[in-house]
Amino acid sequence: MTTTLTQTKAEAQIRQLIDDHTRAICAKNLDQIMAHYAPDVVIFDMKPPLALRGIEDCRRMWETSLPYMPTISGMEQQAVNITLSGDLALVHWVSRFAGLAPEHPAAQMWLRVTAGCQRYGNTWQIIHEHVSVPFDPGNGGDCSHA
């Protein structure tokens, strides 16, 4: 298999990982969400604590967060960018919740997501995730226009 075909296959697998992870979040299915993380994952989330280390901390974060998430039908993702190097990938994109009333605060909020992924055999897992909300100090913090 040529390098181009290998990269194309890896990119498709990573896009599938992102899609599967997103569907699991939308369904609020904790076990499916956790299946996408490596055991030694490190997460920088948009809410405290600032850093989570390991699958147990990650699971606790999702357990405590899911009940407060709005019911959504999906997530709109834009500008997905994948950079590959062997068994490592860096992926970043912007995302927002879909299926909410337009005036719902979560429908107006864009998230910036960066995921470091590693291939184990033929499976990609998230080894690092960083989620943040843009902040515009010149506009009173509002980045809904981003």
Image: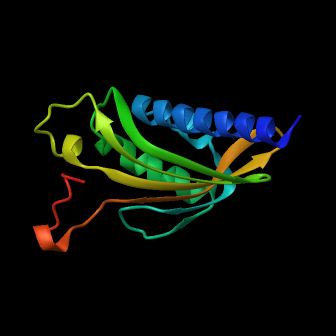
Q: Give the quarter of the image for residue 41.
A: bottom right
Q: Is residue 134 above or below residue 67?
A: below
Q: Quadrant of residue 48?
A: bottom left
Q: Residue at x 19, y 52 (%)?
A: 144
Image colouring: rainbow
In the foreground, 63 or 32: 32
Which of 48 and 110 lies nearest the eye of the viewer? Answer: 110
Q: Position of residue 61 (x, y in %)?
A: 46, 54
Residue 30 screen position, x and y as percent? 51, 37
Count of marks placed on residues: 0
Q: Residue at x 31, y 38 (%)?
A: 97
Q: Is residue 132 left or right of residue 146?
A: right
Q: Is residue 54 left or right of residue 76?
A: right
Q: Nearer the viewer, residue 146 or 47?
A: 146
Q: Residue furthest right?
A: 1
Residue 116, percent across and down?
A: 62, 56
| Vertical relation: 131 (above or below) 104 | below
Q: Quadrant of the N terminus?
A: top right
Residue shown at the point (80%, 46%) measured from the top left: 120
- The reply to whether residue 21 is in sight is yes
- Residue 140 shows up from this direction: no
Residue 114 vs residue 17: left or right? left
| Quadrant holding the C terminus | bottom left
Residue 32: image location, x then y, percent: 57, 34
